[in-house]
Image (cartoon, coloured by chain):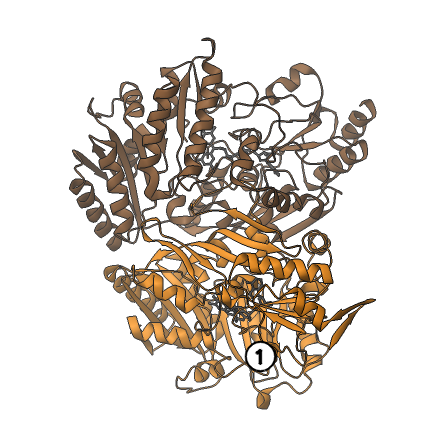
Amino acid sequence: MSSVRGDVRIDARTLQEALASADPVPETDHPGYTIGDATPLAAVRPKTIDGVATALTAATRLGAAVVPWGGGTRMGLGNPPSRYDLALDMRGLSSVVEHRPEDLVVTVEAGCTMQALQDVLRDSGQYLPLDPPLPAQATVGGLLATGISGPLSTAVGTPRDQVIGMRAVLADGSIVKNGGIVVKNVTGYAMDRLYIGAMGTLAVIAEATFKVTPLPRAEATVVATFSSMNAATTVCNVVTAQGLPLMAAEVLNGAAWSQVGQSDDGNGDYTLLLRVAGRPSAVARSIDACVAACRETGVANVESLNDDASVSLWKKVTDLGWESGPPDLALRLLGTPAHSAELVALAAQESDAAVSVSPTRGVVKAYWNSDALPPDVHAYIAGLREAVTALNGTVVVESRSRLDGVDAWGPTPDSFAVMRQLKEQYDPHGILNPGRYVGGL
Amino acid sequence: MESLIKELRQALGRRYVMERPEELLVYEYDGSVERGAPQIVAVPADTEQVSRVVSIARKHGVPVVPRGAGTGLSGGAIPAKGGILMPLTRMNRILEIDAAERVAIVEPGVVNIDISKAAEPYGLRYAPDPSSQKACTIGGNVAENAGGPHCLAYGVTTNHVLGMETVLADGSVVWVGGRQHESIGYDLRGVLIGSEGTLAVTTKVAVRLQPLPEMVTTMLAIFQEEDEAGAAVSAIIASGIVPAAIEMMDKLTIQAVEPAIHAGYPADAGAVLLVEVEGLRESVAEEAAEVQEICRASSATEVRVADDPAERERLWAGRKTALGALGRLAPSYYLLDGVVPRSRVLDALRRIREISQEYGLPIANVFHAGDGNLHPCILFDERIPDELRRSKEAGGAILRACLDLGGALSGEHGVGLEKQEYMDLCFTNADLDAMARLNPGFASGETFNPGKIFPSGASCVELLQHPAIAKLGLDAFV
Ligand SMILES: Cc1cc2nc3c(=O)[nH]c(=O)nc-3n(C[C@H](O)[C@H](O)[C@H](O)COP(=O)(O)OP(=O)(O)OC[C@H]3O[C@@H](n4cnc5c(N)ncnc54)[C@H](O)[C@@H]3O)c2cc1C
Ligand SMILES: Cc1cc2nc3c(=O)[nH]c(=O)nc-3n(C[C@H](O)[C@H](O)[C@H](O)COP(=O)(O)OP(=O)(O)OC[C@H]3O[C@@H](n4cnc5c(N)ncnc54)[C@H](O)[C@@H]3O)c2cc1C
């Protein structure tokens, strides 16, 4: 077997031999690393950062294209890599290196799953306020590589905001670090910011240090259903302005609400979820304030869920659309908070998408299963992109199982020239996840 | 040179381009120990003029050094290689406050505290509050990724800036990040924040605003021993409370402050702790009670509590006048900015005491205890032969001690000229090379603020810290 890249021919044997010391994965397991219909020529699962470096050095020498693998839960995010020779499975680096509860700091290897990490932290009454879908599979490295976050970032910011140090391996095999185990640090450039959210196209993340947070003593979620999106966002704004300890706010349309297993009485309704956390006294007061804000708009049915019930509802909300693997179509619309309602209307027009929006962040997620897909998906996405771009927003195609030829990211941002120059600097031979990211990065 | 000045004057107007030595003199300093003169000072009025200055400079092959208020403490705004110094202070308009979205769009020369003042009528504020907030600019904050006493709970500049309009070395104007909370592509915003003006010029900033807390309680606890105060800090963190601020003053600082403001600190006090909790009434009351209990359990001799603004201000007074008061103890001082894991603060203070003895120089400590960010202040007299050299060496020893304890060279003041020669103590060549690749990535060449951050092999320059303090008045605090 071999793959051709320009005039370079990569021979599977040569590649596998070069990787002999980097914990190769037996060939029989290679199908596990299939992306679309591409299976790599080789796969490694190094147990140390040096092993990662060895693999990347060999890949650079041979010009082999590398796809870093975490849990594989978002392997479909972005465009399929334009070349794919080597799967670099990071799950061999799976330990929690050091948890310093007294410093509220933890250092963890990239292949550690989010659940394994949270389990360690919970023993000390702490947690990392990031709650990815499918935490038993999703890895720290994958989470940071995508840089995407969910509802909790209303309160605590994005994954970037939690990272205080990082070790990464560049395409040429050099092992680099920045930051450290201190919570405040401006020593040198913030390189971790560059690697986080780069979709594994600039560097392979090997280890990260996070600041962690004490577990809240209590939490609750107030649930209220409104007849219009505007009514729901208005209440959300009222509540956020009050300085309540609001952890997350999300609005689900009727289809989404029924998909998270709740009753669906009345399509076209919008259900607002307000999650508060803190001391029991503050939570009680916050629930009252949220309920009052809802009632003021005339909604009759306001419910509040405490602690475990609240936690499990949010788990369903984060998994929404992905409960049983990738949905047929998943779009993520990025805009400003003020455009939330408009984005929701655009996403749901002429189709029965399940839509969930974070009005405090202007991030809309829409999911379709095959029976509900818009009739002409290509035209639909193109039209949506045009409308959303007019609002200075972006449409990301997160999953499109049967959609060839649709770019996942759409128009490139203003600063794209710099991004391309950075790609040339950090991955000059284009071996890391080639073509996956914006504009073919 | 002449045609350079002519072109700049065409772009900005005559009076905004200065070249006479007496005009340049005030721009030789910032808040740091460093000093260096520009050849030209050019003060643009808007983004377009910034872009023109950059293009003209590029054409003539001279560097541009952006400058805010010049309160930086690591020599960031000192033109290390001459060229054009470009203060952004004329660009000081708050362009927009969007209360519903809790975003403000401001020009880079806006003074930090003015954002919060403008937001206050909407019940909002801009959280990062460097102690220099009455003078420093948001552009300088972005460049240094500034922190402040209240960053313990809310994070530093990078956690509150959604995006910036920037001028790149080719004169092009691009937004990185923006009003959107999420965007696609590499996080240029995150990389530029803290890049100390070496990669691009910030011409607009979109910042997040947050609701003002319903209630704030400030506590001042007095301890006989530094160790007791340190234990109290650890116990507070361990209890799961995340106060908005935990600040500490050591014995020497207390001795300097007491005669200045008569706060009533006992003569034998070993340490003073300031703890502030804020949020909803309910939780503030509970947390304040717990903090007091912890302080007493750690042998605090006295705990003062205040929750109305005037009273709280009185409790902060000692902390806020500390630097000015220390300035009276010695003709000069050298202010450092090391950081250690918060549980190692006491070890760091112990090492600093040893270093103080070794070098025969008094060292005061007034700092952000909650996040392990130390500000040792080495007192010396530059007229005494050798004191200058010894204080610099003591500073180096302290930074090394911070690294030994698992810490870092700078918590909030940046590397600039001050700490560039220490960079290879904590970074390998590969680490530094990865950082250096940002420069060609942004195609900035030698255009912006050259000669900073990376080790140059040169030795440090004159230590002179008084000018900035004088500028900010004696209420300046760090
Ligand atoms: C609250 C929350 C909500 C989220 N919601 C969404 C969502 O709606 N949609 C969404 O797409 N994501 C979402 N994410 C992010 C998603 O959870 C992460 O993408 C996921 O954790 C990926 O983990 P993984 O290990 O399965 O990554 P994988 O699927 O294995 O990899 C994902 C990508 O990252 C690269 N990669 C993996 N590991 C590394 C590494 N160590 N170094 C460099 N590159 C690497 C891969 O090459 C691939 O391109 C959310 C995250 C949070 C916290
Ligand atoms: C008394 C005192 C207390 C202090 N307390 C704190 C504190 O609590 N926390 C803290 O973090 N810092 C503190 N500082 C340090 C200093 O105030 C901060 O670093 C501040 O961010 C500098 O802002 P400035 O406007 O004065 O910038 P300057 O000193 O003028 O410049 C600093 C750097 O920013 C660059 N720069 C300025 N504007 C721009 C722009 N528009 N575009 C690109 N680059 C630009 C300059 O080139 C330079 O590298 C303190 C300083 C003093 C004197």
User: The residue marked by circle 1 belongs to what chain?
Assistant: A
Q: Is A423 situated above or below B331?
A: below
Q: Locate the C terminus of chain A and report the quarter of the image it occupies.
A: bottom right
Q: Locate the N terminus of chain A and report the quarter of the image it occupies.
A: bottom right
Chain displayed in brown: B
Q: Which residue is mark 1?
A: A29
- Give x and y (percent) for residue B56: 78, 34
Ligand 1 image-quadrant field: bottom right
Q: Quadrant of residue A12?
A: bottom right
* Closer to us: A31 or B301: A31
Q: Which residue is the extreme one toward the bottom?
A: A371
Q: Total label count?
A: 1
- Give x and y (percent) for residue A225: 40, 77
Q: Is residue B246 left or right of residue B100?
A: left
Amino acid type at mark 1: Asp
Q: Is A30 situated above or below A157?
A: below
Q: Residue at x 34, y 70 (%)?
A: A221
Chain displayed in orange: A
Q: Residue at x 70, y 59 (%)?
A: A60
Q: Is residue A324 left or right of residue B285?
A: right
* Closer to us: A270 or A308: A308
